[in-house]
Amino acid sequence: MVALKFVQESELSAMNGAGAMAGSGLQMAVAAGLLALIALATWLKVRGAGHDGSEKDVFLAGGGLSWLFVAGSITLTNLSTDQLVGMNGNQMLLLAWWEISGFVGLLILAFIFVPIYYRNNCTTVTELLDRRYSGDTTSVRTLISALFLFGNILIYLPAGLYSGGLFLRALFGGEVPLIAYAAMIAIISAAYTMLGGLRAVAVMDTYSGFGVLAIAVLIVLLALAAINWDFSGIPPERLTFFGGADSPIPFHTLFTGMIFIQIFYWSTNQNITQKAMTAPTVREAQKGVLAAAVVRILIIPVIVTVPGVVAFKLLGNVGDSAYGLLVAKILPPWLSGAFAAMIAAAVIAHTAAVLNSTVALYAVDFHERFVGRVRDHWRLSAIVTVVVMISSIALVPLYENATSIINLLQQLNGLSSMPILSAFVVGLMFRGVSGHAATAGVVWGVALYGLFTFVLQPRGVVTLHYIDFMVVTLASSVAAALIVNRLSGGRASLINRAQRA
C-alpha cells in the first residue's frame, strides 16, 4: 500500500496561487453557464416522461432508457474526482490496471449478471438474494443492504464531496471554505435526485460525460506536449506495468483478488448495476454496458494515469495534488471555466447517482419491510435524500487528513466487497442454502477482513497484500456459509449451468 498524503495546506496554497487564473468573474460565469446548460438539456429530455410514483419509475427510470444513457450513467457514476485526483495522485502508470481490469468486470456484468437481474425483475441487487436462498432471507438481504448503505453514507458520498470541493477550491482560489463547495455540489446533486429520479441522473450523467471525457483527453494531450512526449528522467517504477511486491498493485494480484474486486464492483454493487437495469430489454442494457466497457478500455486508463506521471516530471512527487497542479499549469485561461464546470458536473453526476442508489436501497429493503408500504416513492425519495445529503456534508471534514483517497477507498472496500460477493456466489452456485447460513458467511468475512486490516497486517502477523487477502476472505466466507448450513441441518448442492442461468 502506498500511503501518499492527501493534498496538504502548503500544496493547496500553491494550487490556489496557480489556480487564480480561474478565479475571475469570467471563468466562474463560464462554469455556471455550462452547468446551467446541462441542467436545461436534461430538463428538456426528461420533461415529457410520465411519472406514477412507483419504485421502477423513481429508481429505474421507468425502464425506458436507451443504451446511450445506460453507458453514460455507468461511466459517470464511476468517474469522479476520486478517480481523476486519486489515481493520478499515485503518479504511476501501474494504477491503470484498476481500469483495464474493469473492462473484464463490465463484460461479466453484460453477459452473466444483466440477464439474471432482468429475469428476476430486480430493482435492487439484494432482491436477487430473495430468489436464491431458502427459508427466511430477511437477514442476509438486510445485512447486505445495510453494508451498501454504510459504505455510501459514510465513505463514498462524503469522500466524493470532499475531493470535488477540494479541487474546485484549488481551481477558483479565494477564501471560500471547502465545505461550501462540497455543500453546493451536494445540494445540486440532491435536486437532480429529488426532481427527476434516476432518469434525470442518467441523462445528466451522459450529457456531462461527453464534456468530462473530452476535456480530460485534452489535458492528457496538453500534458504530453508540455514534456514534448519525452518520459526520460521519470523513474522506471513509475512507468512500468509490472508492479513489484511493495507496489500498490503487485503484478500477481491481477490473477488473484483483482478479478473478484471487479466482479463485485461492476456486477453486484447497487451503485453500478442499478444503471444497467434501466433499459427496456436485456439486449438494450447489454449494449449500454458494452459501450461503457469500450470507453473504459480506450479512454479511462489514460486520463487517470498519464497526467500524474507527467506531473512527476514537471513538479516532482506532489501526491494527490498532482492533477490540480498540472491543470493549473498547462490549461489555457479561457478553458479553465469550462474545465471547472466539467469537473463539477462529474462530481454532481457521481453524487446524484450514489444518492439515488442509497435511497433505493432504503426504500425497497428497509422502509417497505420494516416501516410500511410506500405509496409514493417520489415523496419518500425526497425526504431520505435530504437526510443523506445533510449527513454527507457533515462528514466531509473527516476526510481532510486522509491518506491517498483512492488507496483508502480500495482498502475500505475490502471490509464489505468480498463478504457481499460471497453471498452472491453461494446463492448463484448452490441450492439448499438458508439465508441465515449466508448471513453467517458475510459476518465472518467482514470480521476476518477487519481483523486483517486493522490488527494482523499492521503488526506484521500476516504480510499478504490486501488484494491477495480478498481471495482468502471470499473463499473462507463461502466455506463458512456452507459449513453453517450443514451444521444447521441443510444440504447444499451445486446448481448445474442450465439451472444457474
Image (cartoon, rainbow, N blue to C red):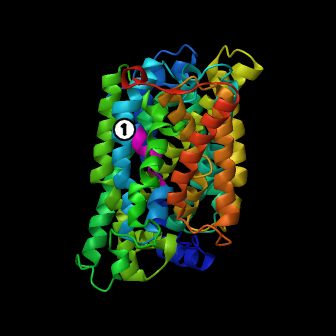
Q: What residue did someone put label 1 on?
A: 108
**x, y percent for residue 132:** 54, 23
**x, y percent for residue 350:** 50, 45
> Given the current orientation, which residue lies at the most extreme right position?
371
Q: What type is the residue that disc 1 sits on?
A: Ile
- Residue 102 vs residue 446: left or right? left
User: Would you say residue 129 sits in the magenta stretch?
Assistant: no
Quarter of the image where one finds residue 384:
top right
Quarter of the image where one finds residue 369:
top right
The quadrant of the picture occupied by the C terminus is top left
State the residue in front, 64 or 245. Answer: 245
Task: Give the class, few, some or many, for how many residues have Cα within 10 Å of label 1's Cα (few <14, many ≥20).
Answer: some
By secondary structure, the bulk of the magenta-drawn segment is best described as: helix
User: Would you say residue 78 sits in the magenta stretch?
Assistant: yes
Per the rendered image, the range of residues in magenta is 74-80
> Is 62 above or below relative to 11?
above
> Given the current orientation, which residue lies at the most extreme bottom position?
233
- Camera sees residue 408: yes
- Residue 272 vs residue 294: left or right? right
**x, y percent for residue 22:** 46, 66
> Is 80 above or below relative to 443?
below
